[in-house]
Image (cartoon, helix red, strand yellow):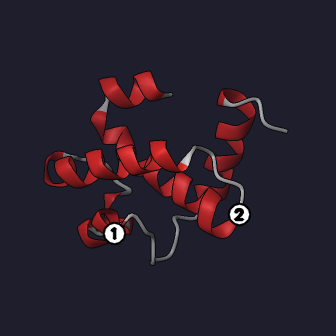
Amino acid sequence: MIRRLRSNRNQLVPFYIAACFSYFEEGDPLISNQLFDKIALALAREYHQLDHHHKQWVSEEEVKAAVFLGQYPATTHKIVENLRRRIFNHV
């Protein structure tokens, strides 16, 4: 997954949202706090250059504060579930 983030920077947006959901809503983080901080920093640095249809769900201010205060896209739960199953082999 990290390779994918490096090669397609637009994927920072949905991955950030999924990471926030898993941490804040489920209490079961997908990634370490250190990796989350790196992703949040990269997303904040590149926010205005990124083009992803989920970008409207998260503000630049939220990213800079490494939080998510809005409503999650309807597909977020399924995306997190898929990441756990397919990428991280989490039961």
Q: Residues within 10 Å of mark 2 (few under 14, many from 20)?
A: few
Nearer to the camera, 58 or 73: 58
- Residue depicted at 51% across the width and 28% down the height: 1
Nearer to the camera, 6 or 71: 6
Looking at the image, the residue that sits furthest to the left is 49
Question: Any mark on residue 21, and which?
Answer: none
Classify 86 as above or below 10.
above
Q: Which residue is mark 2?
A: 27
Give how far across and how far down residue 47 sits, in percent: 21, 53
Give how far across and how far down residue 15 sits, in percent: 47, 46
Secondary structure of residue under mark 1: helix
- Residue depicted at 38% across the width and 57% down the height: 54
- Residue 15 seen from this side: yes
In this picture, residue 48 sits left or right of residue 15:
left
Q: Are marks 2 and 1 in contact (CB under 8 Å)?
A: no
Give how far across and how far down residue 41 sits, in percent: 29, 50
Q: Which residue is mark 1?
A: 65
Q: Amino acid at mark 1?
A: Ala
In this picture, residue 59 sits left or right of residue 24:
left
Q: How many marks?
A: 2
Q: Amino acid at mark 2?
A: Gly
- Residue depicted at 50% across the width and 75% down the height: 71
Q: Residues within 10 Å of mark 1 (few under 14, many from 20)?
A: few
